[in-house]
Amino acid sequence: MNPAVTQWIQQLADPDQAVAFYAYQSLQEEVLRTKEPAAFAAVIGKELIAEAKPGEGGSDGPASFRNNAFLMAAAEKTAAPLHPARVRARLARLLGYVPDASAVPYLAKALADLEVREMARQALESNPSEQATEALARALDAVGPEFSVGVVNSLAKRSGAKAAAAVRKAAGSPQPEIRIAALHGLSEFPDPSLDEILERATRSAAARSAARKTEGLKLALAKYGFDGLIAGIRRDEEATRAKERVFSPRGAEGGWDVRDQPAEFWDQFNASPPPGAHLRVHPILHWTEADIWAYTRRENIPIIPLYLANNGKRYRSLGDADITFPVASEASSIEEILLELERTKVPERAGRALDHETEDAFERLRVAGYL
């Protein structure tokens, strides 16, 4: 193995970002071309989990987690690491390039490192070995609810009986966010024995909520005979809503024919509803989530605190309390929300249980009259 590896590891902590970047690039090239992945994993792994001598250490400390009791308690039990968090995160990422199980013991231990465990989880997710699956499955029993959803998502991206068994176990969690993630993950496994679990899930609170809203709207239409309803849906919210039109005709029962939508070229709209039916009008259909927040900031529109981060989570989309969950976020102001939206890949409705059912579930609800 290249004797410069040790020097590059030390340079990862260099205050000169150019030096640190060059060191990381050099280490990445080394792991990709090495013929001794186990030796490389041993050197990098030992540095990743190395503990500092008393009075030394590069951790940012428990103050990073002062707003979270679970993280605070865990941090107090963790020995101070030798390297700062930014270095340990890079080391964990490098272990993600190791193509065999030799990196797994170090990454598994790093799952207890509150400052870099997310990077360690992603590295285990990309590791093809069965040992990586086992490490993630064990982590479900060892980590708190703050981290379990990510572990479930990683297991759902893997194959094999062990991964499926771990996700099935998580589907029985008393924590609703873990349970929803697990039920969504079970649909990724081609195992007929899981169908019953998923079938029970579709008869859950999400299904009852959707039926309540759909039937309630139909009753209101029958009672008041509206010619049109104005709704604030947007195309970027959900794939089915991307098929909508600004002026969307509905049948007499409020039904929606997704295959028979009027053309709306050059902003020319048909504003006449069919006889006995009505129109759904969607004036902000073309807006994005970022547009909404930019407009809210510009017009100084008041918002409720649920949209702002509290203990590392916030709501991006609101629905019934029993089927709507917060997502991980540190955005505590509209400005921070806008910055977060520029880099996140998490869907806006990730916390809505309804969106985690079968692929066509939402479309079937809209065909039936769901707003």
Image: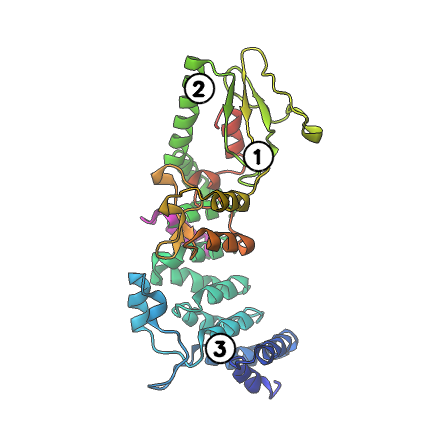
What stretch of residues is rendered in magenta?
163-177
Q: Do the numbered discs 1 and 3 sit on residues whose CB atoms are within 8 Å?
A: no
Residue pointed to by mark 2: 218
Residue pointed to by mark 1: 285
The answer for how far apart the CA atoms under marks 1 and 3 are is 49 Å
Q: Secondary structure at mark 3?
A: helix
Residue 324 on image: x %, y %: 39, 42
Which sits earlier in the primary sequence, circle 3 or circle 2?
Answer: 3
Dominant secondary structure of the residues highlighted in magenta in the image: helix
- Type of residue at label 1? Leu
Location of the N terminus by quadrant is: bottom right
Task: Indicate whether residue 353 is drawn in magenta.
Answer: no
Residue 149 appearing in the image: yes
- Type of residue at label 2? Lys
Residue pointed to by mark 3: 45
> Which residue sits at x=49%, y=77%?
45
Using residue 306 as the reference point, say whether residue 6 is left or right of it. Answer: right
Q: Secondary structure at mark 2?
A: helix
Q: Residues within 10 Å of mark 2 (few under 14, many from 20)?
A: some
Using residue 173 as the reference point, say whether residue 237 is left or right of it. Answer: right
